[in-house]
Image (cartoon, rainbow, N blue to C red):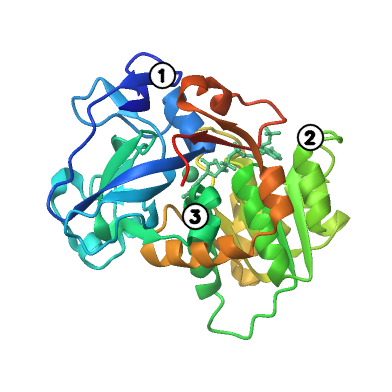
């Protein structure tokens, strides 16, 4: 079968031929429909994030997938059922307390692998196997966009964790700001715009730009960080009740504290490389304490977040799906899905259709 992988010493995706996998007991065989590409895949290719499976000379890419159950293999799933796979797996097939609790997204390093990211092959293949309990049903009506369940689930978890910190009091947020106009940022912006009176999105692009067009169409305010740095948001626009960082630009983590309104919460998603710079730690500490602010980090997601994401996917408007997906390519032309120009938002590798 065809797979898209990266080999050691290389930093581009390659079309490789591999044997079709057979499901072990408890696993189903899935025929892949589509696999999305995001910032994390680019980080995996450049070697700045993730790592190969132990001893392997290549890693199959891809962690945002949708497929159809080909062989249920006695798992209780039905052949033909559309599913989206979660990403974290038990290392070496062993279990641990995080997986037993159904919270592998909270497991520490070394206690999990991530398919297509760290220590495990991904889903960019004509077929993949997975334990049935990591395959979340997706309605056929949205199968075409089922690869968005994974990125949406990242935000379902981030929001859940961030809002949980504000539960002890009567929090009445009105304004939200997303830092980053990549695919994760734009999906999140639409979600937040359903909840908040006023939303903002920070990028660093000149108009005209397809991501800024989406921000406009959502009805949010576009903020260019070259003109308005994040910590100047309160002076130029307003202090934010909620900030969702999806740039991976490390200074944003600290500027978020200043940009938050009193009692606000900022959630950090980006995965920057080491980077030393100066910050006024005293003021940050003071600001967090005296204004009841919260800064929280979050990574990955699990089954309940995927289930919430399936609900959200069904609400996404057609225009947003159309504008967001800028490339659909077959495995033979996979380079197109990894091109990184300003006109690329979400690229998809299509292996098959329903
Ligand atoms: P992208 O790389 O597609 O998007 C990042 C966006 O941030 C780009 O549009 C970029 O703009 C913008 N940006 C970067 N620096 C600045 C800046 N200084 N000012 C304004 N805008 C800036 O990535 P994704 O959308 O896929 O993901 C976003 C981040 O979240 C990544 O770091 C990714 O690794 C991380 N991530 C984390 C997950 C988690 O579980 N925590 C899950 C998924 C992703 P431009 O294109 O113009 O350079
Ligand atoms: Zn991702």
Question: What residue appears at the point 43 percent right and 45 percent down from the top-left corner?
Answer: 65
Name the side, left or right, on which 297 lies relative to 320. Answer: left
Name the side, left or right, on which 136 lies relative to 152. Answer: left
Question: Which of the two residues, 132 or 72, is positioned nearer the viewer here?
Answer: 72
Question: Which of the two residues, 192 or 97, is positioned nearer the viewer here?
Answer: 192
Q: Position of residue 143 (x, y in %)?
A: 50, 53
Whether label 2 lies within 8 Å of ligand 1 gets the answer yes
Q: Is residue 96 above or below residue 13?
A: below
The reply to whether residue 53 is visible in this rendering is yes
Question: Which of the two residues, 225 or 91, is positioned nearer the viewer here?
Answer: 91
Instruction: Give the SS element for disc 2.
Output: loop
Q: Which mark is residue 149?
A: 3
Q: Is residue 293 above or below residue 24?
A: below
Question: Residues under labels 2 and 1: Cα distance?
Answer: 31 Å
Question: What residue appears at the point 35 percent right and 54 percent down from the top-left corner?
Answer: 80
Query: Which is nearer the N-term, disc 1 or disc 3?
Result: 1
> What is the crowding at mark 3: few (fewer than 14 residues within 10 Å), some, or many (at least 20)?
many
Instruction: Give the SS element for disc 1.
Output: strand
Question: Residues under labels 1 and 3: Cα distance?
Answer: 25 Å
Using the rendered view, name the quadrant where residue 351 is placed.
top left
> What is the crowding at mark 1: few (fewer than 14 residues within 10 Å), some, or many (at least 20)?
many
Instruction: Give the SS element for disc 3.
Output: helix
Question: What residue appears at the point 47 percent right and 42 percent down from the top-left corner?
Answer: 353
Using the rendered view, name the quadrant where residue 199 is placed.
bottom right
Q: Which mark is residue 14?
A: 1
Query: Which is nearer the N-term, disc 2 or disc 1?
Result: 1
Looking at the rendered image, the quarter that the N terminus falls into is top left
Name the side, left or right, on which 62 lies relative to 128. Answer: right
């Amino acid at each position: 079968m065809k797979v898209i992988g990266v080999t050691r010493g290389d930093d581009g995706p390659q079309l490789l031929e591999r044997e079709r996998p057979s499901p072990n007991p408890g696993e189903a065989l899935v025929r892949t429909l589509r696999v999305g590409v995001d910032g994390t895949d680019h980080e995996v290719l450049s070697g700045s994030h993730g790592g190969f499976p132990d001893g392997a000379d290549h890693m199959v890419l891809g962690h945002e997938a949708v497929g159809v159950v080909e062989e249920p293999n006695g798992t209780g799933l039905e052949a033909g059922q559309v599913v989206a796979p979660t990403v974290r797996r038990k290392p070496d097939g062993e279990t641990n307390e995080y997986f037993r609790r159904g919270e592998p997204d909270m497991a520490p390093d070394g206690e999990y692998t991530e398919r297509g990211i760290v220590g495990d092959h991904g889903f960019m293949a004509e077929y993949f196997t997975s334990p049935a309990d990591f395959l979340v049903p997706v309605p056929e009506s949205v199968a075409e966009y089922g690869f968005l369940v994974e990125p949406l689930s990242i935000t379902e978890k981030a929001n859940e964790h961030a809002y949980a910190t504000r539960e002890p009091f009567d929090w009445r947020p009105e304004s939200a700001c997303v830092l980053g106009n990549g695919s994760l940022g734009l999906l999140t912006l639409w979600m937040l715009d359903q909840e908040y009176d006023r939303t903002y999105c920070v990028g660093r692009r000149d108009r005209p730009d397809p991501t800024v067009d989406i921000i406009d169409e959502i009805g949010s305010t576009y903020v260019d960080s070259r003109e308005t740095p994040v910590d100047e948001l309160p002076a130029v626009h307003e202090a934010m009740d909620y900030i969702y960082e999806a740039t991976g630009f490390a200074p944003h983590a600290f500027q978020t504290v200043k940009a938050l309104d009193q009692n606000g919460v900022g959630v950090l998603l980006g995965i920057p490389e080491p980077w030393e710079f100066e910050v006024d730690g005293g003021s940050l500490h003071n600001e967090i304490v005296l204004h009841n602010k919260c800064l929280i980090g979050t990574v990955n997601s699990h089954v309940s977040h995927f289930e919430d994401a399936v609900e959200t996917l069904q609400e996404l408007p057609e225009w947003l799906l159309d504008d967001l997906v800028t490339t659909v390519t077959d495995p033979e032309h996979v380079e197109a899905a990894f091109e990184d120009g300003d006109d690329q938002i979400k690229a998809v590798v299509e292996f098959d259709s329903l």
